[in-house]
Image: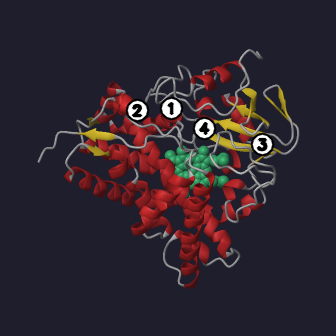
């Protein structure tokens, strides 16, 4: 392996190669050294993994821990007001995305029944209704409108609120607080305040459900006396956040990407049967959850390198999904491509619990949008679309669109 590419200092986030492409520094790194040391802003020598095969093997190996309480999590960006961390952060009860087996297994198992393929298929019709209702509202507006605000964010928020039994009327507060929590550049104190507000809101909600359960996923969990209120709160936080932020960003930047590829868009309009494959390819191409974190619990060999125990390891799903050793012509969006094996829903024990739900929402969302708005187009030059380079989940902050009103 060549050492010619310098060790990165901090995670490169500048989308210098275009809104849909990885930062060029990440691409160079993958091509030269797919498992590479990286210097964190606090001086810690950690690692970044960018090659497809290497990312896949890492994610299948639980010795690369998801626990942030095991070691100090070194933050790959400068966060204003961040105190110097000398102690590992405590484990958040219920937050099983940041746990290892067997703790992870115990909690995830309580939810697998609610997210089976069969359960999700039963929901498909209802999700389509939610999409159509939102499209009716959109059609009544006078363009130009922000597609994120009026469509991409409401659809997954409505769906996850209904599934979990969170009042949609409270969306303002949880959408604002999750956005603040996921903002890489927000001062640390403000991030924690947003986290505290979300937790307080959800603790009250699950306490109510324990006393008086209804017909929703959080109520089903609240009936299980094995789970404490703090665990229920953490699970609710995880599901609510993961359930709307990710899919909303895929719908937003996915529409942007399609509008920027008019031939593929036209093909998709002509043959909606292409949608499932197109969604998989958009997932690969856009990789909105671009980076994950792991912690090496011991010295570990990966891709011919030795990662010392105690290292924080960044996993670039975005770089892996653009690896030419796995996908031919990886930087082209090609809705006919066999994109199965794309890593955007993760891999291994933490593979996305909501992936079937997300797929159904995206298929229904893109299908409805393309059918109802045959001449949908950007209302600003593409270069003016605000990219979420400051956020932990990538996408667009807003997508100004217009169309020719028919009525
Ligand atoms: C396009 C949309 C989505 C994307 C790109 C996405 C991506 C991911 C990724 C990459 C992971 C793995 C994290 C890791 O290994 O550290 C994950 C985990 C997870 N996702 Fe999603 N997700 C999406 C939608 C959803 C939805 C709709 C839900 C609904 C509940 C959801 C719930 C979860 C949960 C609970 C986990 C943690 C699983 C575990 O730790 O066992 N996700 N997701």
Kindly state the secondary structure of the residue where label 2 is placed: helix
Residue carrying label 1: 285
First along the sequence among labels 4 and 1: 1
Q: Dot 3 lies on which element?
A: loop
Q: Is residue 10 above or below residue 140?
A: above
Most extreme residue toward the front is 81
Is label 3's Cβ within 8 Å of ligand 1?
no
- Indicate if the residue with disc 4 has its beta carbon within 8 Å of ligand 1: yes
Q: Is residue 309 left or right of residue 279?
A: right
**Do tag 1 and tag 2 residues touch (Cβ < 8 Å)?**
yes
Cα separation, mark 4 vs mark 1, equals: 10 Å
As measured in the structure, the alpha-carbon distance from the residue carrying label 4 to the one carrying label 3 is: 15 Å
- Counting other residues with Cα less than 10 Å from the Cα at mark 1, is it few (<14), some (14-19), or many (20 or more)? many
- CA gap, disc 4 to disc 2? 19 Å
Q: Residue at x 67, y 69 (%)?
A: 231
Disc with the residue nearer the chain's start (2 vs 3): 3
Q: Which residue is mark 4?
A: 343
The label number, if any, that marks residue 257 in the structure image: 2
At mark 4, the secondary structure is: loop
Mark before the other along the chain sequence, 4 or 2: 2
Give the labeled residue for mark 3.
61
- Picture coordinates of residue 1, whole percent (x, y): 78, 17
The answer to the question of whether label 3 and label 1 lie on touching residues, with beta carbons closer than 8 A, is no
């Amino acid at each position: 392996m060549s050492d010619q590419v310098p060790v990165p200092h901090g995670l490169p986030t500048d989308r210098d190669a275009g809104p849909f492409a990885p930062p060029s520094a990440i691409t160079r790194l993958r091509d030269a050294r797919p498992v590479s040391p990286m210097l964190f802003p606090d001086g810690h020598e950690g690692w970044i993994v960018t090659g497809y095969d290497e990312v896949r093997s890492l994610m299948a190996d639980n010795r690369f821990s998801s626990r942030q309480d095991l070691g100090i999590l070194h933050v790959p960006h400068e966060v204003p007001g961040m105190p110097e961390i000398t102690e590992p952060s405590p484990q958040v009860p219920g937050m099983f995305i940041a746990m290892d087996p067997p703790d992870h297994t115990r909690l995830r198992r309580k939810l697998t029944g609610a997210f089976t393929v069969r359960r999700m298929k039963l929901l498909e019709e209802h999700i389509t209704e939610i999409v159509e209702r939102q499209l009716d509202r959109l059609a009544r507006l006078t363009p130009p409108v922000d597609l994120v605000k009026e469509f991409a964010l409401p659809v997954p928020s409505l769906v996850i609120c209904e599934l979990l039994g969170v009042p949609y009327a409270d969306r303002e507060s949880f959408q604002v607080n999750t956005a603040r929590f996921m903002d890489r550049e927000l001062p640390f104190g403000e991030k924690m305040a947003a986290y505290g507000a979300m937790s307080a809101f959800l603790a009250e909600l699950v306490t109510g459900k324990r006393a008086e359960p209804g017909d929703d996923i959080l109520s089903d969990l609240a009936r299980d006396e094995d789970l404490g209120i703090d665990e229920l709160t953490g699970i609710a936080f995880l599901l609510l956040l993961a359930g709307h932020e990710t899919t909303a960003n895929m719908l937003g930047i996915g529409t942007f990407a399609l509008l920027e590829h008019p031939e593929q868009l036209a093909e998709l309009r002509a043959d909606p049967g292409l949608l499932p494959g197109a969604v998989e390819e958009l997932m690969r191409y856009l990789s909105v959850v671009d980076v994950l974190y792991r912690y090496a619990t011991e010295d570990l060999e990966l891709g011919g390198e030795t990662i010392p125990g105690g290292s924080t390891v960044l996993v670039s799903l975005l770089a892996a999904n653009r690896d030419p050793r796995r996908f031919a012509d990886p930087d082209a969006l090609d809705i006919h491509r066999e994109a199965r094996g794309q890593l955007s829903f993760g891999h291994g024990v933490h593979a996305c619990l909501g992936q079937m739900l997300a797929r159904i929402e995206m298929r229904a969302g893109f299908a409805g949008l393309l059918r109802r708005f045959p001449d949908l187009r950007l209302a600003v030059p593409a270069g003016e679309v605000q990219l979420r380079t400051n956020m932990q989940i990538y996408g667009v902050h807003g997508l100004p669109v217009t169309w020719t009103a028919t009525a």
